[in-house]
Amino acid sequence: MNLLRFLPLLLLLCGCAREVSPVSALALDCKNGVYCLTAEVVRQDSPDDTAAPAYLSATGTDVTDALRNLRSILPGDLYLSHAQVLLLSEDAVSESILPLADYLCRENDVRLSLRAAVVRDGSAAELLENDNEVYALSELLDRSAQDGILPDMPLYRVTDVLHADGTAILPALRVDAFGQTAPAGTAVFKNERLNCFLDGEIGGGAYA
Amino acid sequence: MTAGRNEVTPPYKITFRIIFIIVRTLTRGETMETITFTADLERNIRMMQELFRNDDTLIIRRAIGQNGLRCALFFFDGMVNSLAINQSLVRPILRCEQPRLSADILAAAVLQADECRVETDMNKVFAAFLYGDAIVLTDGDARPVLVNTKGFDKRSTAEPENERVLSGPREGFTECFMPNLALIRRRVNDPRLKFRFMRVGSRTNTNVCLCYIAGLCENSLVERLETRLTALDIDSVLDSNYLAERIRDHRWSPFPTLGTTERPDVAASRMLEGRCVIVVDGSPVALTAPFLFQECFQSNDDYYISFLQANLSRILRVIGFVFTITFPAMYAALMLYHRELVPARLLFAVSAAQRGVPLPIGWEILLMLFVLEALKEAGARTPGAMGQTMSIVGGLVLGDAAVSARFAAAPTVIVVAIAGVTGLMVPKLQTAALWLRFVLLAAAASWGLYGVGLALGLTLAALCRMHSCSVPYLLNLVPRISAEHEDTWLRYPWFFMRCDRFAVKRPSKEERP
Amino acid sequence: MRERLFPRWCTALFALLPMSELLYLPADGQSVYAAALACTVCALAGIGAARLSDRIRHSAPAQWVLALTSLFPLLASIARMSIFLQKTVFTGRSCGSTVVLLTVCILFMASMGLNRCAMWALPIAWLAGTVLLLSGVLTFTQLTPASFSAPTAALLPQFRHILYSLLPASVVLAFSLPETRLSASVSRGLSAGGALLALLLLRTVLLLGANTAALLPYPAFTAAGLAAIGNFARHGEVFFAVPLLLCEVGRCAALVCALLYPFTRTCGVLHLRRPQ
């Protein structure tokens, strides 16, 4: 009888293991009011291999919709806890980014230390797929922030300043002439929208 | 700590206990079959032959003195020292010129033994006789003379396998009762060292000795242990564990509430700390009470090597214990519920290793833990070097094969191996570690780190409830006694330490030497 | 062993009360002052209640009132713990399962009696304090002092909110103490726990900023996720939450002891079966 008492313990051992699709970075583009979310999903088939990225995209009317659609095409659960970078195209930040920031802050899985960056002169998805190495973008942003080349603005700080007065700065990236991802100054937000870049270039008439 | 000293047993409980002991003693009957001797020697011999019929080890030696003194010697072959029988008993009787002697004169003036007395209590006579003493009967006197002739073979006092030290004394207890007590006496040359004997086991009638130092040990502790030992109603005691499981507090707890040692120096040190030691005849393992949780992390070595090294070892043991119980559970919790805590690249590698393994992580770890325990058990039961070889080869080959066959993931094997190795650092808590490992694993698999935290909290609660002989089990953790902080979780250097400052009970001013 | 509640244990038990509030409090510039003020008021009320505990112990109606009063903070604690677990980690599970788990744990601990609960609280208070301070130290470099704000009248609603959840538990437990001389320990415990609570709230505000913190259901919990040791334990809120959850389980167990006092009439171990 005493042994029977331990049976429930054994049943508990099943746990709730689930297959996940870990995402290391996200890119958000917007064209004609349709949002396109691209995820850099990490694949590693054996412990000896190196982690390789795979890119999956989904569209939606807003970020939530795009995320829902992305979830449906992934083999496992969308796992954002290890996502470290969110790339935003210039089109995507032409409207207020506050709802996006709020949504990400409230999302349980997303790290508050997630770094957002604005992509200049091109789509965010292209820049994401430019580096074929997992966490290369994150390391670039970290290094640039340490060197003072780019601003150090994790998600929680951006959200706070956006809520305070609607102004914020974010690091900007671009694909340079050699086809490499490179820092491209600072994106300045006013009224929760992209206003200009700090290297002097105004972000188009639409942002003025 | 005021605990224990302040406990007052209600009078009705004492009365009930006394009545219970008296009734049990009266209804239990004789502890062994005995006879009553008469003045007729031949009749006594016949009675002894009848009593020990079919026991060929009984030797009856008739001896007749020079002028017709007729005596008979009874002893067991193999239990006595033959030289002592010949020179101390047989030769003096054969040379005796008296035609008739009383038992008193025989014991006082003829027999040449160190311990020689006339004993009328037949229970005592037969208990001693069965334990290697010789009975001498003389014609015309019904009273037997009991002579100490014990001389059975015994193991040497070699260092115990389970309590090896790097430096320090290497003597260990053996299965022989009196030599064990002598080993303790040799270390504590104090008239206040007390040995209280009692017999336990209605069939084995085993000698049990309660050892303590008067003044250092609380009287209530001695009385409590004595009451527990005398109240035991058992047939046989073949090892100290027969008693330990019966007299300990919290019998169902995997945490030990009675200490064990095979070393006389440890037994002596425990007594110097105000504890009682119980030595059982036939067992090389002595019991110590009370036993505190902190003692699980203390080793004999700690007192014989540099305090710096000793304290580092103690800290390592505590960490080792925490590791051995939590490591498999933490791994399961992290991989099932809290993947975000694992560094990204490590997570990808572990997930890749885990892919293709048929069992859920909880079951996989459970299976590997079972294999580990099986290997340990097989290694322990297999003789000598073969056991070691089997453990190593079994571990390596099975682990590698399990990983290659995708039966278990490599990280799981590593986690279980670490849990197994660290578990060996605290041998006194191996049972507790084994159970806790499984319980925490189940908690982790079902409730993640929250489950582990709650399970550890409840374990701490269970420890808070526990006591050993009325002393709180967690003494020096909670409650903390600042005056006695010299040998608890850390050991102070000897030049800071006074013996009575690390006692379980600090002697009062009146009791101090 | 003589059953006794030592002052140090009592201090630890009362220190758990403010600490167990930390997970659920909103964090803004005023919450720091509100928490400090509420803990001071609770400490003063606790001293008074502890001094009156002798009279309460000898009055059966008062004991019943106390037992019924303890139900409110007890049920509130279990409910908020369950909701917290369901919202943060066990999103797929029903609240009922967490309620059952927590209730079983609380009842097991309550069977130790108030004295042993307080004994248990001592190592838990040290553990929780150490983890909380460590978490604070690890995020120290990320703090932005600009988020600091001076006290204003806006702290009053928050003060009331903290007082509602902290005062009943403090007063009930202070009334349940076996000795009046423990009143100093009550104030010491509540003050120490309150200081830690205020510090951690301050850390949350300075780290996340008042605006981000306002978005989050459990700001102190989320802020702790930013503490990391190198690349390890990033997003390690759970290490922060587990000791706090233990604090709350201890607080609930002590409240159950107060609830059961009219039946058991002891602060010692409640024997569920006949002692051997």
Image (spheres, rainbow, N blue to C red):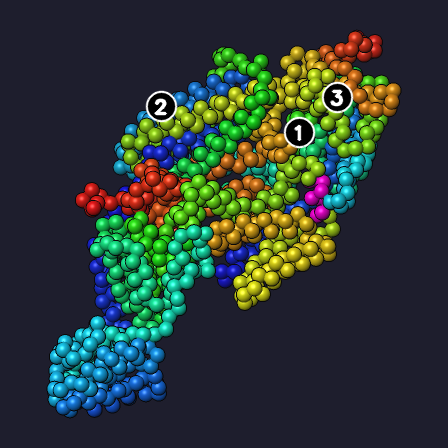
Amino acid tagged 1:
Arg
| Percent of width and height locating residue C92 | 64, 41
Q: Chain of mark 2?
A: C
Of helix, strand and loop, which mostly describes the magenta segment?
A: helix
- The magenta span reads B347-354
- Contact between marks 2 and 3 (CB within 8 A): the answer is no
Question: In this view of the protein, which residue sits in the foreground, B98 or B31?
Answer: B98
Dot in front, 1 or 2? 1
Q: Is residue B399 above or below residue C2?
A: below
Same chain? Circles 2 and 3? no
Q: Is residue C20 above or below residue B302?
A: above
**Separation of disc 1 and disc 2 at Cα?**
41 Å
Residue C182 is left or right of residue C144, and the answer is left
Q: Chain of mark 1?
A: A
Q: Give residue A204's quadrant in the image.
A: top right
| Percent of width and height locating residue A96 | 74, 17
- Residue bearing mark 1: A111
User: Element type at marker 3?
Assistant: strand
Amino acid tagged 2:
Leu
The tag on residue A117 is 3
Q: Is residue B396 above or below residue B512?
A: below
* Residue A56 counted in the magenta span: no
- Residue bearing mark 2: C44
The tag on residue A168 is none
Write the residue at 52% across / 60% down: A3
Instruction: Answer whether residue B486 is visible to the viewer in this image.
Output: yes
